[in-house]
Amino acid sequence: MIGRLLILVLLVALAAVAWKARGYRQSALSAMNKVEVISERFTKSDFFEAENRQWLERGERPDVVFMGASITKRWNPEGKLGDLKVAQRGVGGQWPSHYLLRFASDVLDLKPRAVVIKACAITFRPGVDDKGTRRALLDMCAQAEAAGVKPVLATCVPVREDGNAVYGSDGKKQPSGINDRLLPYNEWLRQLAAEHGWGLIDFYKAMADEKGFLPADLAEDDIHPNAKGYEAMTAAARAALEPLLAASGS
């Protein structure tokens, strides 16, 4: 009798171990899948392969390509910028250093008249070095100019003051830390545009409240605009791009 009980206990224990092992395996596979998704987001360069091919097959060229991250991805200014033909090339979670991997296929191959380059707030989390962002932006501007494409710099949209989804390197809420880092970057963009004769869309000035944050009535969440916020972005883009491209001709 005791022997049977011992065997039963051992079988139950083995079953428990097998169940835990199955759980660990599923967790490991899930983690690996997440790593693959993140890796693809940062290294893949053909997100818009089909759309780019359509432009080329039609023999058309966009007037403006918008390069950016999630804010650009959620934005559809097509048909809202007068007669300008637009190609939206936003990929959520990317930084300007990642844009470089797809800059040739998403911008240069399409031969647009201008490219708008916009960084997202995640690039400026406390503890993250933004030197790479600045180097990447300068590199893209140089490539664009060499190809006859007008660089247009876009200031970064501020984050909400009461947001809770934007974190610093220590894991605490630090929306003000992000905004503090946005200010010198945005000012740097303004100076670059003035020095080099590049275009500028000042989304920050168009959307920041009196304290320099994204106001609640323009926000979908902590960092993304809502429909009204995108209307403000579209108005700012149109006001900057129409005269710029009219002056540059075809």
Image (cartoon, helix red, strand yellow):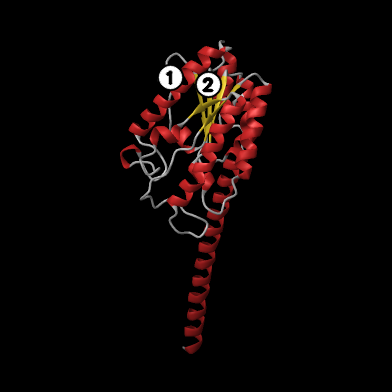
Horizontal relation, residue 180 to residue 222: left or right: right
Is there CB contact under 8 Å for labels 2 and 1? Answer: yes
Near mark 2 (Cα within 10 A), the count class, few <14, some 14-19 or many ≥20, is: many
- Which residue is located at x 37 percent, y 44 percent? 211
In this view, which residue lies farthest toward the top?
250
Callout count:
2
- Which residue is located at x 64 percent, y 25 percent? 144
In this view, which residue lies farthest toward the right?
146
Mark nearer the N terminus (2 vs 1) = 2
- Which residue is located at x 58 percent, y 38 percent? 96
Near mark 1 (Cα within 10 A), the count class, few <14, some 14-19 or many ≥20, is: some
Q: Report which residue position mark 2 lands on.
A: 64
Counting from the top left corner in percent of width and height, residue 2 is at 48, 89
Q: Tell me, yes or no, if residue 245 can be seen here.
A: yes
Query: How far apart are the alpha carbons under marks 2 and 1?
Result: 10 Å
Residue 121 vs 12, above or below: the answer is: above
In the picture, the quarter occupied by the C terminus is top right
Secondary structure category for the residue under label 2: strand
Task: Give 8 or 28, whichever is nearer the viewer.
Answer: 28
Amino acid beneath label 2: Val
Horizontal relation, residue 88 to residue 228: left or right: right
Amino acid beneath label 1: Leu
In terms of image quadrants, where is residue 31?
Answer: bottom right
Counting from the top left corner in percent of width and height, residue 18 is at 53, 68
Task: Give 13 or 113, whichever is nearer the viewer.
Answer: 113
Counting from the top left corner in percent of width and height, residue 102 is at 62, 32
Secondary structure category for the residue under label 1: loop
Which mark is on residue 81?
Answer: 1
Counting from the top left corner in percent of width and height, residue 5 is at 47, 84
- Which residue is located at x 52 percent, y 46 percent? 124
Residue 7 vs 246, above or below: the answer is: below
Which mark is on residue 217?
Answer: none
